[in-house]
Image (spheres, rainbow, N blue to C red):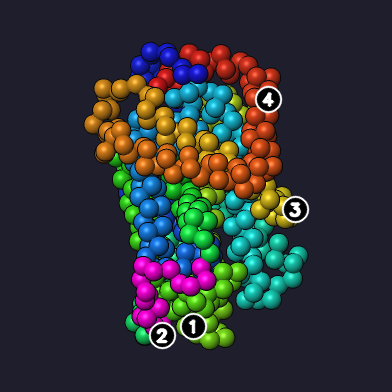
Amino acid sequence: MIVSTQLEANDSPPRSTPPRGLGFVSATAIVVGEVIGVGIFLTPAGMAKALGSPALLLTVWLATGASAIAGALCFGSLAARYPESGGGYVYLRRIYGPLPAFLYGWMSLLVIDGGIAAALASGFSSQMSYIFRLSLIEGRGVAVGVILALSIVNILGTRFGVNFVRALTILKLGALAFLAIWGFGLGLGDWSNFVPFAARRSGSPPLAGALVGGFIAAFFSFGGWWDLGKLTDETRDPERTVPRSLVAGVLIITIVYITISAVFLYLVSITNVTSDKNFAAQAGESLFGRSGGVVFSLIVVVSVLGSLAALLTTAPRVYVAMARDGLFFATAGRVHPGTGAPFVAGGIQAIAASILVVSGSFDQIIAYFIVPMLVFLGLIVAGVYVVKPNRDRASVTRIPGYPVTPLVFLVPLAALFPLLLVDDPVRGLIGLGVVAAGIPAYYLMFRRSRTKLAVDPRTSG
């Protein structure tokens, strides 16, 4: 259902907003900081082993990066058109109405955001456990502790939290640059590992399956760039800053992934790759011998910490937006009177993630909701074809290459959807079923809010 009210945006009831302290550099750091996490230390080994060719590995990264940039241009256009915090929730509400938006928030609240935070925190604790030889209980305590600590950092204010994320992102990129310079600069690898460049190595698996697996791994390694839109209210000149930062962030991520994969191939020949062993361990052994594990565990710690900090900064804004619209408990929309931070929503996020850490079930839970997430991403990007022209913001909502650009994102997404569903139909269908279970909750719990949103100008496309 597309909401068709024609009221002007300036008739919208006033609402309090936090200070706009997020500039281009900080916004770009949010994108890079959240996306570049543990994935780059895990995916190159398996991708290289399956693809069996440096050229194919480069092609997969470039193609996925191009698709992500196309998606970022579309998200940036929607952020410019609807400059309010909440990201995908806001775009779905504005384009299709409150029900799809509620279901997106329902999924995010119950599973996705808490599950990803729990997975990142557990990845952090696993590296700390390797360094300090922690027990299982101690490791889970470290995971919960880092979630609570970063949540407190965010309560201190958006500016403080974002500066912390920016510092971690700089440190993360510095550590990865150190890896590239150390590996290439000291000649610790072998350039012959790139020969032959295009031909596949003998013993490689069938090409079709290898490409499918490679693109799936690459897609998930890029996941999360779209979360910047959740901070639109706190961004200076959001109509321009958010689109520019999204594209700049995805470009940086693409360059980093290609560079680190090249270092990996330089240090470890494809024929010697063990796909069940992560990149950090293999490259660390090549660089530093037995001490390499500790060195690279520290790099992973910094990388994961930056991703977790960025996620805990952006995710609570969805619940604030839902509470503002009457689609969640009003208390969740409260912000700290001094810092403007959404401390109640942040606390809900921290509790949900901590429970999942203790239960240890987050990986399986996330697997159920990958397919629904693809559906929502597709709906959001397809929304650029649905929204009506906006004369007031025509100059900032124009998408370069439109109408082809959205298809560069949607076509690969549409190809990925059935592959994932066929690969694990039970989990995919259960995930879609749980999302659908939000429909009766929407009609039973938020009937009055549905009436309000039907005439609220903020729901108008």
Q: Is residue 125 left or right of residue 172?
A: right
Earlier-in-chain disc, 3 versus 2: 2
Question: Which residue was labeled with disc 2?
Answer: 188
The amino acid type, in three-letter code, at marker 4 is Ala
Disc 3 marks which residue? 359
Mark 3 to mark 4: distance in Å?
26 Å
Q: Amino acid at mark 2?
A: Leu
Amino acid type of the residue that numbered disc 1 sits on in the rendered structure: Ser
Q: Position of residue 422 (x, y in %)?
A: 61, 44
Locate residue 395 relative to residue 75 in the image: left or right: left
Residue 342 shows in this picture: no
Q: Is residue 42 above or below residue 432?
A: below
Mark earlier in primary sequence (1, 4): 1
Position of residue 331 measured from the top left corner of the image (x, y, whole percent): 62, 32
Disc 2 secondary structure class = loop
- Of badges 3 and 1, nearer the viewer stands 1
